[in-house]
Image (cartoon, rainbow, N blue to C red):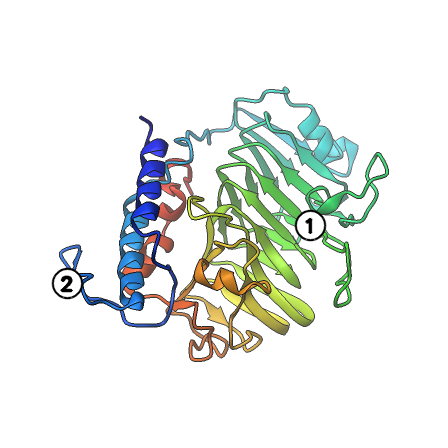
Amino acid sequence: MSKFQCIFYIAILLILLNSGQTLCHTKGIRLKISRGKLKQSTINMTGTQVSEQQFMQWVKFVGSLKHSVFRTAKNKLFPSNTIIVDKNPAAGDFTTIQDAIDSLPSINLVRVVIKVNAGVYTEKVNIPPLKSFITIEGAGADKTIVQWGDTAQTPGPRGQPLGTYGSATFAVNSPYFIAKNITFKNTTPVPPPGAVGKQAVAFRISADTATFLGCNFMGAQDTLYDHLGRHYYKDCYIEGSVDFIFGNALSLFEGCHVHAIARLTGAVTAQGRGSALEDTGFSFVNCKVTGSGALYLGRAWGPFSRVVFAYTYMDDIIIPKGWYNWGDPSREMTVFYGQYKCTGPGASFAGRVSWSRELTDEEAKPFISLSFIDGSEWIKL
């Protein structure tokens, strides 16, 4: 029996054993733990206390696991080939990033570095699923810019709207992707409140084990589509207005600057975890949140949405409630939203919704290191 099957059957067993009880995340009493066991038995416990006990068991379970729903990562970091992209044909191998990608074998199994010299590259880029181990390296995030201006309602090749998925300026569908020192931009302006079809993705990552170092992601609504897989963002700048970091990946954002350009109300995240068995979520560690408008830390796009902010500075743009249930009160019982040792005028937990959580040291531990994304397997900085 595989590890995944074991975890699946354990999860089903836990659900059956506790089918008559409701799980929730509240600010209520936390039970003391001694040598890994809760001191208080479930006899004569309130529903809230039982929920707290089950929650702590879940935290310890998550913290002790490798994310076994993902394959063991085997990255290739030593480059076997370097390609130069430059606006000047005489200075590089190609003048567009897409041409450089198209030049690679349809099944790529070695690390290829594509160095993109300074300039603004107005093109739509797509990396197909079997072209793995690609590194895109700019001359600096302020010097190398890839931009396009599609939205969800832009007509595609067959006349049908592209949709949010297809609107991305730069789309990656292959594993072991690395981006360094480059800006990905969707030039669509901030949409008016209530506008339909204005989702405009700057970057979409739809594959496992991707690393982003010193990159900028710039757009308005739905800037960074963190679609699926395990991802690491280090020292990146992410700008947008509404749900501008969204998707259902398992991602760690470390030392990143999140900047809102909302006119009125916006949200940093819309994490799409759809069930208790999905091992996904966003964790922001040592980041800062600044900008304009009034901002939620997250909206519950998925009924089991999971987001944590730790050691993060929050400007006064954060709405005191912090989180929004997407208009569905039932999601308040299943989402996991937490803060840990955050600072700044927007970080006060006093006004947060009752179904979010101010984490203890033990509760925060699984979310604040590379182990959250099995990073020791595939990240070498």
Pick the residue in front: 82 or 336. Answer: 336
* Residue count near mark 2 (Cα–Cα under 10 Å), binned few <14, some 14–19, many ≥20: few
Residue 141 visible from this viewpoint: no
Can you identify the residue that label 1 sits on?
201
For residue 301, side relative to residue 311 (left or right): right
Pick the residue in front: 110 or 281. Answer: 281
The quarter of the rendered structure image containing the N terminus is top left
Can you identify the residue that label 2 sits on?
39
Q: In the displayed structure, would residue 173 be above or below residue 334?
A: above
Rendered location of residue 192, percent (x, y): 78, 67
CA–CA distance in space, label 1 to label 2: 49 Å
The quarter of the rendered structure image containing the C terminus is top left
**Residue kind at label 2, given as amino acid type:** Lys
Pick the residue in front: 258 or 235. Answer: 258
Say what secondary structure mark 1 lies in: loop
Q: Earlier in the sequence, mark 1 or mark 2?
A: 2
**Residue kind at label 1, given as amino acid type:** Val
Q: In the displayed structure, would residue 91 be above or below residue 151?
A: above
Say what secondary structure mark 2 lies in: loop
